[in-house]
Amino acid sequence: MSRPKRAERRAADRLQAKLGKDLLRLAASEPGGNPHKPITVTSPSEVEPHAAGLPCPVCQSGVRVEEHTAEVIDGVRLRVARVGCTFCKTKRAVYFQLAGSMPN
């Protein structure tokens, strides 16, 4: 069986990249995918385990938490976990809001 020609491989790569972008856009509409739909947690210590438990939206592999910060976005204090896929290296942010309104 012959290998696919270069043009066919490039077309397949373009389709795969487009699919990845579509999957990331879909993940942004789910809870935690954008600052307007944060995931509610009761404690900051729950952010990293919860973010690490989410699969990569592109390849469904595991992710690693690279950074966990507290940010104010549109006047709302949120926790942001920046994660990267261990397989396809896709990076994204997952947004969390603390259930209690009192600061630590």
Image: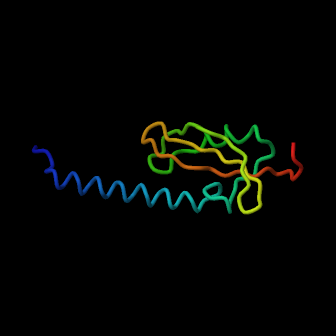
For the N terminus, which image quadrant? top left
Q: Residue at x 50, y 51 (%)?
A: 57
Spot occupied by residue 39 in the image (x, y as percentages of width and height): 70, 53
- Work out which quarter of the rendered image holds the C terminus and state it: top right
Say which residue appears at 87% left-offset and 53% top-offset.
101
Measured along the vertical axis of the image, is residue 88 above or below residue 21? Answer: above
Q: Residue at x 52, y 41 (%)?
A: 84
Q: Nearer the viewer, residue 20 or 73?
A: 73
Query: As rendered, which of 26 and 10 lies closer to the eye?
Result: 10
Residue 31: give x, y in percent of width and height.
Answer: 65, 57
The answer to whether 98 appears left or right of 5 in the picture is right
Tag count: 0
Outermost residue on the left side: it is 2
Closer-to-camera residue (84/74)? 74
Residue 20 quadrant: bottom left
Identify the image quadrant of residue 49. Answer: top right
Side of 50 where 61 appears, left or right: left
Residue 32 locus on image (x, y percent)? 64, 54
Q: Residue furthest right?
A: 102
* Protein image colouring: rainbow
Residue 45 in percent (x, y) is at: 75, 37
